[in-house]
Amino acid sequence: MSTDNNVVQLEFDYINNAREIMDNSEPEDEYIDDSDFTLYEYQMAAINTLGPDRDPRSLALGVGGEAGEVMEIIKKGFRPGKEVDVAHLKEEIGDVLWYLAVLADTYDLDLEEIALDNIDKLERRYANGS
């Protein structure tokens, strides 16, 4: 199997492992109120679904692969007579978020801090409305 095929297989393994863990997991002792669920809590939950392999290359390729799926859903939704499959779009955006959360953690980055810093940057950039 080539290196590229190994990376793709690792990506599929990550997703399948995450789905299996989520499907088979026992309820947590501590209930997380969905209305207060933070990006930090999401990142910690995402990390718990990751297997022992934290290869940043696989995670980065996973971001790209899942983002490609998002683009494909949008592309198909703009074909004549078609609509964007919003439920499928939501699922794929979730997969992108999972990869970003785990990749960020691999480099000791806090997803919530990244999000806040990004908004601050954009507010400064577009402060005058342009």
Image: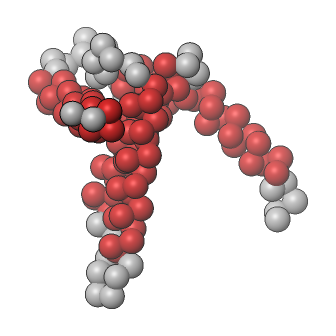
In percent of width and height, residue 31 lies at 31, 20
In percent of width and height, residue 16 lies at 19, 33
Location of residue 33 (image quadrant):
top left
55 lies above or below 58: above
Point 40% across, 55% down: residue: 68
On the rendered structure, is 22 left or right of 101?
Answer: left
42 lies above or below 93: above
In percent of width and height, residue 76 lies at 33, 73
Closer to the camera, 5 or 21? 5
Closer to the camera, 30 or 66? 66
* Residue ranking furthest to the right: 128
Closer to the camera, 77 or 63? 63
Point 34% across, 74% down: residue: 77
Location of residue 116 (image quadrant):
top right
Closer to the camera, 59 or 124? 59
Image label count: 0
Res. 120 visible in picture: yes
* Residue ranking furthest to the left: 24
The C terminus is located in which quarter? bottom right
Location of residue 5 (image quadrant):
top left
